[in-house]
Image (cartoon, rainbow, N blue to C red):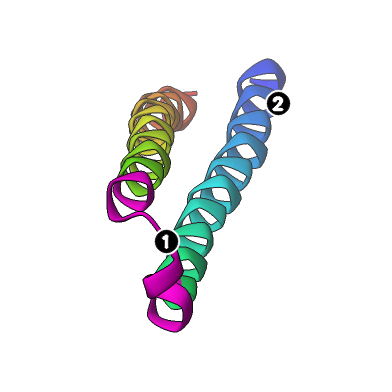
Amino acid sequence: MNTLAEKYSQLIQQEDSYFKQVRTTEMCMTALFEYTIQYGELLNKLAVEDILNAIHQIEMNMRTELLHLRLEKAFLACAMKEY
């Protein structure tokens, strides 16, 4: 049981890390939108779009990792309640 509880604790820490990473990508996109509002006339639209798409892809990859982690955590919680 102790190893299951330790693993669950590790997953919680990992989940927190993923949440922070997702929040960071969201903040980066927001900053880029705000910068574009202020200085859009100085920017290349296609470059900004490519940068946003890259950040968005990073966010989606993180969300996929988070999804798998949360599923693993759910199955682990189920196993823990059986003990």
Amino acid type assigned to the residue bearing label 1 in the image: Leu
Labels 2 and 1: the sequence-earlier one: 2
Pointer 1 residue? 43
Residue where numbered disc 2 is placed: 6
Instruction: Describe residue 64's horizontal placement relative to residue 27 as left or right.
Output: left
Q: Position of residue 57 (x, y in %)?
A: 34, 35
Look at the picture and state if 58 lies above or below 2. below
Residue 61: quarter of image: top left
Residue at image position (44%, 31%) is: 73
Identify the element where label 2 is drawn: helix
**Number of other residues with Cα within 10 Å of mark 1, as a class: few under 14, some 14 to 19, many 20 or more:** few
Q: Is residue 46 magenta?
A: yes
Q: In the rendered view, tell whether residue 62 sits above or below residue 22.
A: above
Residue 62: give x, y in percent of width and height.
43, 35
- The CA span between labels 2 and 1 is 49 Å
* Along the line of sight, the residue nearer the viewer: 10 or 37: 37
Residue 42 horizontal/vertical position (percent)? 45, 67
Task: For the N terminus, give its image quadrant.
Answer: top right
Q: Residue at x 33, y 30 (%)?
A: 64
From the viewer's perspective, is residue 5 above or below residue 29? above
Above or below residue 77? Residue 72 is above
Question: Magenta segment, which residues?
Answer: 36-49
